[in-house]
Amino acid sequence: MSDLSFDIAHLLAGGLVLISLLMLYQDRLTALINVFAAQAVTLSLSVAWQAYVQQAPHLYVTAVIALAFKALAIPVALHRIIKRLGIHREIDQVVGVGPTMLAGIGLVALALVVMLGVTSEADRLAREDLAFALSVVLLGLLMMITRRNAVGLVVGFMSLENGLVLAAAGAKGMPLVVEISVAFSVLVAFIVIGVFLFRIRERFETVDVAALDRFRGGQG
Amino acid sequence: MGVTALAALLLIPIGAAAVLALISSYRLSAALNVLASAAALVVAGSLFFHRPPGGLYLRVDDLSVVFIVLSAFVGFTTSVFSASYIAHEVEIGRLTPARLRFYHAMYQVLMFAMNLALIANNIGLMWVAIELATLTTVLMVAVYRTHEALEAAWKYFILGSVGIALALFGTILVYVAARPVVGQGLVGMVWTDLMAKANAFDPALLNLAFVFLMLGYGTKVGLAPLHAWLPDAHAEGPTPISAVLSGLLLNVALYAVLRFKMLLAANQTAIAPGPLMIVLGLTSLIFAGFMLYRRPDIKRLFAYSSIEHMGIIAFAFGMGGPLANFAGLLHMTMHSLTKSAIFFNVGHIAQVKGTQRMADIRGLTVTHPVLGWTLVAGVAAIAGLPPFGIFTSEFLVVSSTFARQPLLAIPLVFGMLLAFGALLLKLQGLAFGDPSPGAARARASYLPMFGHLALVLAAGVFFPPLITAWFQHVARLLG
C-alpha cells in the first residue's frame, strides 16, 4: 500500500477519535448533535476511502448509509425532537468537563496500548484502524455514562457504533459489513423512536393538565 | 430432507408471523400460534435423525441440536400457556386487538431469530440473529405501554444494545484473527472453517476478542454485573415473554458464548476462557442470592433466580471437562423447563390475585390449591430439592468442583444455599398462612406446567441412558 493512501486512512480514522473527544465536552444538546453529524461525515469519508483502497465496492454502500442516515436523517430528527420537547437549550453533563476529558484521554491511551500490543502481526493499516476504532468505542461508552439525558445517551451509542463500522470497514474483506450496518441503522432508528415516545410520555405523566398547558404555551 | 428441515425451521415461524400480523381474532391467532410452534417442534425433532451438511450460512451439529430441540419444546409449551394467558388479558382489556396481532407476530419473529442464531454457521449471521431477538423482546416487553413497561424496555434496550455492540467488536476481532489463516471474505466467518484452523490464529487477538464477546453476549445471558436489564424486563412484560426470556433467550446467548469458548479452546496458545466465566458465574450466583431476599415483586424474584442459575451454568461450563460440562448442560435444560413452568404458574397467580406484589399474595394453597401446590413443587425444584432434576445437576456441579478445585466449591455452595434459603422463605409466605383476598377462579392451562415439572421430576428420578449418552457426547465436544 502506498504511503499516501495509508496516511489518508490514518488521518480520517484519527479524525473520528478527535471528534469523539470533542463530543465529550459538548454540554448543549444542539451542539452535541452537530458534532455527531460531523463525525458521521468523517466516518462516511473514511469508509469510502477504505472502499477505494481495498477495491471493495460494497463498502461504498456502507459509506452512503452512514452519510444519508447518520449524518443527515438522524441529526435532523433529533434536532426536531429536542425542539419539540423544549430541551434544546438544556445543559446535560453529569461529571465535570475536566475529569471527563482526562478519562477520555486515558481510554484512548488504553485502546492504543491494548490494540497495538496484540496486533503486532496484522498489517499496519488494519492495526491502526482497530486501535482507533476501539478508542471511538470506549469514548462512546464513556459518553453514555456521563450523559443523563436520553438524547445524549443515544448520541453516545451512535458514536460507539461509528467506531464499530470503522473497525468492520478496516478489517480487510470482511463480509456482511453492509448487512451489519443496515442492522445497526434499524437498531438506531428504533432507539430514536423509543426516545421520542419515552420522553413524550415522561413529560405528560409528570405534569398535570394545567402544567401541560403552560408547557405548550412555553413552546409558543 | 435435512436441508428442507433447516429451511422449515426458519420459514415456519416467519410465515406464521406474517399471517398472525393480520389476524385479530384471538382464538384463531392463539390456535395458529400453537400450531406453528408445534410444527417447529416436529421439524426440530427430525434434526436428530437427518442432519443436513453444513453450508456457508447454516448447519446443525451435535451441540446446537440440543439447544434447538429445547428451544422448540419450550416455545411450543409457552404458546399453549400463552393462549390461556392472553385470553384473560384480552378480557380485562390490557391487550387491544392491534396489540394482540403485534404480540403474536413478534412471538414468532422471536422464534425465528432464536432458530437462526442456533443454526447459523457464521459468526456474523449469528450476531444479526441475536440482535433481532433482542429487538423483538424489547418490543414485547413494552407491549402494555405502561410507564413501568416502557422504562423496563428502555433499560433493556440500552443495555442490550451496548452488549450487542461489544459482541460485534469481538466478532470483528475474531475475523481479523482468522483472515490470515482461513482467507478473506465469507469463509473467514464460517464456524466450521474457524474451528478447523483455530490453532493457527493469532492468540493475542483471540484473547482480546473473547473478552469483548464474553462481556457482550454475557450481558444477554444476564451475568452480573451486566444483568440490570433482566429483572425489569421479566417483571413488566407479559408473562409468556418472561418464560421465553428465562427459558430460551438466555440459553441462546449462552450458546454463543460456548461456541466462542470452543474456538479459544481449539487454539493452544490462547488464554483459557474458563476463569473468566467462573468469575462472572460466581459473581452472578452470590449477588443474585443476596438480592433474592429483598424482592417485593414475584416476577422479579424469579428473574433474580434466573440470574443465579445462569451463574451456576456459566460456572459449570467455565470449569470445563466432561463432567462439569455434562452438569452444565443438564442444569441448563432443567432450569429452562423449571423456570418456564414457574413463570406459567406465576402468570396465572398474578392474574387471579390481580397483583404481582408478594405482600398481597398469601395462602395460595388454601384459595387456589392447584396453583399453590404447583408453585410449591416448582420452587422446590428450582431451589434444588431432591427428587427433582435440578438437585441432580447441582449435585454434579458441586461434586465435580470438589474433585478438581475444592476452594471454588466454597463460594459455589455458599451461593446455592443463600438462594435456597431465600426461595423457601418467600415460598412460605406465598403458599401458606392466612389467604389474602382475591379468590377469582383460575382458568389456567395446567398442562404446560405439569408437563414441564413432570419432565424435571422424571429426570431427577430416572435419566434415560440414551439422553445421558447424548449429553456425555456433547460434553466431550465442549472440551
Image: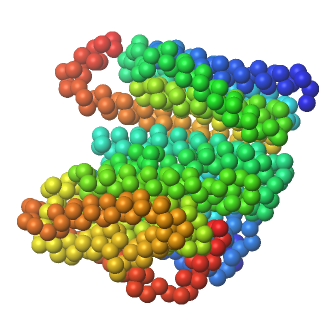
Vertical position of residue B135 compared to residue B66: above or below? above
The answer to whether B368 appears left or right of A189 in the picture is left
Q: Please say whether residue A146 is visible from this viewpoint.
A: yes
Point 86% across, 24% down: residue: A5
Residue closest to the eye, B33 or B136? B136
The answer to whether A26 appears left or right of B430 in the picture is right
Point 8% across, 61% down: residue: B437
Asked where in the image residue B282 lies, by quadrant, the reply is: bottom left
User: Seen from this angle, which residue lies furthest right?
Assistant: A2
Vertical position of residue B170 compared to residue B261: above or below? above
Point 63% across, 26% down: residue: A108
User: Which quadrant of the figure contains the N terminus of chain B?
Assistant: bottom right
Where residue A206 sits: x, y (%)?
25, 29
Point 56% across, 46% down: residue: B216
User: Seen from this angle, which residue lies furthest front?
Assistant: B407
Where residue B286 sits: x, y (%)?
38, 54
Q: Please say whether residue B97 is visible from this viewpoint.
A: no
Report the label total. 0
Where residue A103 sits: x, y (%)?
54, 23
User: Which quadrant of the figure contains the C terminus of chain B?
Assistant: bottom right
What kind of colouring is applied to the model shown?
rainbow
Where residue B15 sits: x, y (%)?
55, 63
Residue closest to the eye, B479 or B470? B479
Residue closest to the eye, B465 or B446? B465
The answer to whether B28 appears left or right of B88 in the picture is right
